[in-house]
């Protein structure tokens, strides 16, 4: 285990926390309509690895899992205290999906693809081009 990349992750309130072990396999930004709903934003940033690459430290009892009934794979797992998305195992048990924002620090992998690009919200491009501020604008 000593040569593996290792990082910590936690939800917004801190109740759910874990260590994750890289290197990770894939990092996709998904713009599908379902990811827009679950993230409340333009896309979901998802890192893929295998289920053995996580060690839970706290808060598993706070995690609520929602499997979208009409979908084969789509799930949303989140902390019931603060609503943050947290890592989860795919329904078929083959993958661990880690919301990139759950991780503290550099995951040592960059996004490899923007998927379901055609579904991106109509305001996405303008949002990227809008003026940038390091804090709330005056
Ligand atoms: Zn939380
Ligand atoms: Zn998606």
Image (tube, grey):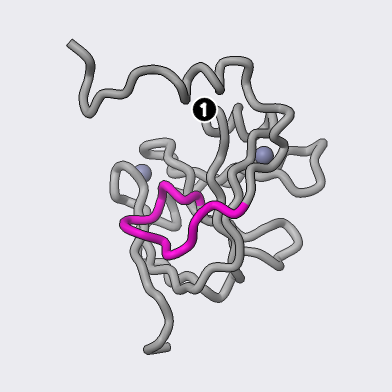
Depth order, front residue of 91/125: 125
User: Which residues, given as a range, are shown in magenta?
Assistant: 99-112
The N terminus - image quarter = bottom left
| 63 or 17, nearer to the observer | 17
The residue under the point 45% across, 73% down is: 21
Badge 1 crowding class, 10 Å Cα cut-off, few under 14, some 14 to 19, many 20 or more, is: few
Residue shown at the point (32%, 56%) measured from the top left: 104
Q: Height in image: 86 above or below 4?
A: above
Label 1 sits on residue: 41
Indicate the position of residue 105 as horizontal and vertical percent values.
31, 57
- The percent position of residue 89, horizontal first and vertical second, equals 62, 60
Task: Single out the residue that lies furthest toward the bottom.
Answer: 2
Residue 82 in picture, x, y percent from top left: 37, 37
Establish whether ligand 2 lies closer than 8 Å to the Cβ of label 1: no
Looking at the rendered structure, the number of numbered marks drawn on it comes to: 1
Question: Which quarter of the rendered image does ligand 1 occupy?
Answer: top left
Q: Is residue 126 left or right of residue 11?
A: right
Counting from the top left corner in percent of width and height, residue 132 is at 31, 23
SS state under label 1: loop
Q: Is residue 46 above or below residue 24?
A: above
Identify which residue is drawn at 48% across, 70% down: 54
Q: Is residue 108 magenta?
A: yes
**The quadrant where residue 114 appears:** top right
Residue at image position (82%, 36%) is 70
Please state if 77 lies on the left or on the right of 116 as rendered.
left
Furthest toward the top, the residue is 138
Placement of 136 over or under 96, stated as above or below: above
- In which quadrant is the C terminus drawn? top left
Q: Is residue 46 magenta?
A: no
Asked where in the image residue 90 lies, by quadrant, the reply is bottom right
Compared to residue 136, the image places residue 12 above or below, namely: below
């Amino acid at each position: 285990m000593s040569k593996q990349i290792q990082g910590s992750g936690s939800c917004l309130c801190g109740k759910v926390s874990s260590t994750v072990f890289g290197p990770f396999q894939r990092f996709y930004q998904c713009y599908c309509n379902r990811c827009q709903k679950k993230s409340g934003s333009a896309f979901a940033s998802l890192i893929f690895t295998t289920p053995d690459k996580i060690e839970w430290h706290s808060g598993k009892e706070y995690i609520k899992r929602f499997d979208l009934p009409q979908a084969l794979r789509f799930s949303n797992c989140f902390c019931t205290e603060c609503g943050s998305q947290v890592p989860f195992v795919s329904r078929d048990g083959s993958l661990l999906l880690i919301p990139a924002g759950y991780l503290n620090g550099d995951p040592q992998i960059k996004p490899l693809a923007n998927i379901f690009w055609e579904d991106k919200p109509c305001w996405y491009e303008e949002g990227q081009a809008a003026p940038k501020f390091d804090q709330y604008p005056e």
